[in-house]
Image (spheres, grey):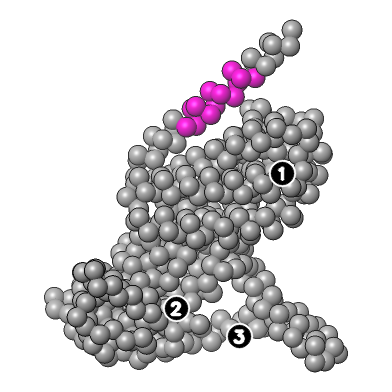
Amino acid sequence: MMPYLLFLALGLASLLQIALFPALRIGGVYPNLVLVMVVAWALLRGVRSALIWAVIAGAWLDLLSGGWFGVYTLGLMAVAALAGLGRRTVYRPTLLLAWAMLAIATTLQNGIQVALLWLNGASPLLNQAFLRLTPREILYNGLVMLLAYPVLTWIERKTGHERLPLE
Amino acid sequence: MLQRPRNRRRIRWWPVIIAALIVAVVLLNLQPIDAPRDLTARLTVPVQRLLRQLGNQVRGATDVVGDATSLVERNAELEKQLAQLTVENLRLKETEAENVRLRNLLQFRDTNPNFTYKGGQIVGRVVASEPTNLVQSILIDIGAKNGIEPGMPVVTELGLVGRVTAVYSNAARVLLITDSASSVNTMLQNSRLRGMVRGRTGQRPIMDYLPQDQPILVGDIVLTSGEGGNFPVGIPVGQIIEVEQNDVEMFQRAVVRTTVNFDTLETVLVVTNFVAPAETLDVPTPLPTPAP
């Protein structure tokens, strides 16, 4: 995959996440498209490739958001590393594994964000939000994974022999 | 023979991670990098606006389809016609809904002549939210070039929305009153008791620091008190729906249902000429119906 194409595609995914998905919230929660993509890609392609996705998409989200710069990059990198480890435990990744990893990854990323925000002086009430929102977010992300996983599987097959410059 | 490429790969990607981590940690300690964010906002806000409109239309269509499903049970033919008309009229309905919102905003402006507003030129559209559900803030499509400044209060015709926290040339970020970092000095309309409404992400906001010896009634209207100078006095915030009273605590608290429905927020007004008054005044305000 051409690097600039990857940069634009992850930029578009980030824009979808902040502009379109919040309009589709259910029960006060909207899905995390970029997280779903990074987890799925880590399972399909491995940790190195997913880390590149995490850095690019994280930088996009950090630029598009209003909080501390680096919060999303750090969270996504941790998620990519974790999901990459999950891939090593199985012969072939499946949607079921993707869901399981997604549940752990959603919890991990939210936990990292709460910890970083808390370190930077956010309200302790954020911890309550973490406990209430994460289960709902896992469910909604799971639905998005149902759609995203086949698409990313197809892309992985199409670009299976290509390598990114940083890979 | 096989060891070499493995080692080489490790050498190639671990420095990238470590470097990225160091850069991220360093950047975490620097306060907002406004210039790159301003540039990003300038380039992406038009796209964000389009995507948000698309999202709003999808949400509207989903609602209409939901209604149509119930009609199917009564009349299959009617549902088919409804679905067709829905698709045909989707754009028109969107325009009509926007007209109603704008008219309501103008009505609010007429009933509150003390404030001046900026936006679209007058109205700001919500174009984006934070990437995470844990932070409740929005991006609106008016910024420094429209006269928006940090700290300005943001309202709708129904009540208080939040406060501008960051301004770019063509956009501004608004921290919602539902965010866990938000606190607003408020008072109860009937008893004039003062308290502080604090946001709780994922839950309804809570009005805290209410004195134990005073009765708090479910249904009481919560207004901004103007204390602290962050918001004008008398803007509706919400309605008390539950009182949490515990004898061992110093204060009692009350759960507030906000008058603004933040899930469907599309347009807002920014109060641009608000100056903190020397003395807080009680100004009667027309009360809107709280969000369901």
Residue B96's disc is: 3
Instruction: Place residue A159 in its image quadrant.
Output: top right
Can you give x and y, in whole percent of width and height, for residue B225 in the image?
A: 24, 78
Q: Nearer the viewer, residue B51 or A22?
A: A22
Please, is residue B273 above or below residue A117 in the view?
A: below
Q: Nearer the viewer, residue B38 or A16?
A: A16
Q: Residue at x 78, y 49 (%)?
A: A150
Which amino acid type is marked by label 2? Val
Can you give x and y, in whole percent of width and height, for residue B222 in the image?
A: 32, 81
Residue A97's disc is: 1
Residue A150 visible in this rendered orientation of the protein: yes
Name the residue that disc number 2 marks. Answer: B260
Task: Say left or right for B48 vs A116.
Answer: right
The chief SS type of the magenta part is helix
Task: Say left or right for A95 vs B200.
Answer: right
Region in magenta? B9-21
Which amino acid type is marked by label 3? Glu
Please, is residue B118 above or below residue A34 in the view?
A: below
Please, is residue B103 above or below residue B48 in the view?
A: below
